Image (tube, rainbow, N blue to C red):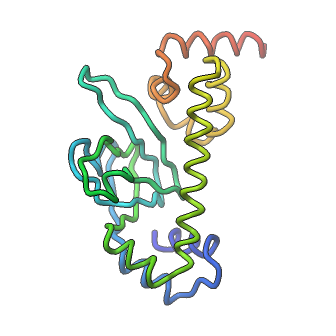
Amino acid sequence: MSEILKNYFQKVLPDFTDEKFNFILYKSQLIKLQRKEIVCKQGNICNLKIFVAKGLLRNYSTSEDGNEHILQFVNEMSWTTDPESFYNNTPSKLNIEAMESSEIFAFNLEDFAELREQIPELNIFVENILTRKSMEIHKRLLMNISSSPEEKYLDFINTYPDIFNRVPLHMVASYLGLSRETLSRVRRNILKTVI
């Protein structure tokens, strides 16, 4: 798994050296997750910044009525956390769960801050990730308030084709803010127009 992490950082950091990688590896913890294992639990402090080396995670909250609301699917070569909980040491509003057997590298706040201090180019890297995430959130918000169910569905399968085939339909519906019945109807209608 460490080769996956090394290859990732070689692509995203200029002048990446074995010394820098060894320090990153030293400050991380490799965690193997079973399907349905929760790595951050709603109500607890989410004290990990997570890099997914293998597998698929989901970030979701559970409302008082027991309904799940999926915020994000996180596949290989992606990062996740509950930023509010991670940076402010407050109870998490999210669960982060493995949807399949997964292997992650996890960093606590102190170690991640030390990495950013010792490897300054990580700050630009983190800024780039935050900018990308912000753009994804804005796109999703606009999609949710201004798009039809058909447009939401088509955007999801075009944006995340590798994830679509790995998650159950009811979770896709939850992510899109649709009922399972609405999503099934949308899929049937789209298939009719294709045939």
Residue 127, image x, y percentages:
56, 64
Looking at the image, residue 74 sits to the left or right of residue 82; the answer is: right
Looking at the image, residue 87 sits to the left or right of residue 152; the answer is: left
Image quarter of the C terminus: top right
- Viewer-closest of 32 and 135: 135
Residue 98, image x, y percentages:
37, 46
How many tags in the picture? 0
Q: Residue furthest left?
A: 44
- Viewer-closest of 140 and 8: 140
Residue 24, image x, y percentages:
43, 78
Identify which residue is drawn at 38% across, 60% down.
49
- Viewer-closest of 153 and 43: 43
Identify which residue is drawn at 32% across, 49% down.
34
Residue 117, image x, y percentages:
44, 81
Q: Is residue 98 above or below residue 176?
A: below
Q: Residue furthest bottom?
A: 19
Looking at the image, residue 1 sits to the left or right of residue 85; the answer is: right
Which corner quadrant of the image does residue 139 belong to?
top right
Q: Is residue 173 above or below residue 28?
A: above
Identify which residue is drawn at 30% across, 30% down.
62
Identify which residue is drawn at 38% across, 74% down.
113
Q: Residue furthest front?
A: 88
Q: Is residue 9 above or below residue 40?
A: below
Q: Is residue 110 above or below residue 168?
A: below
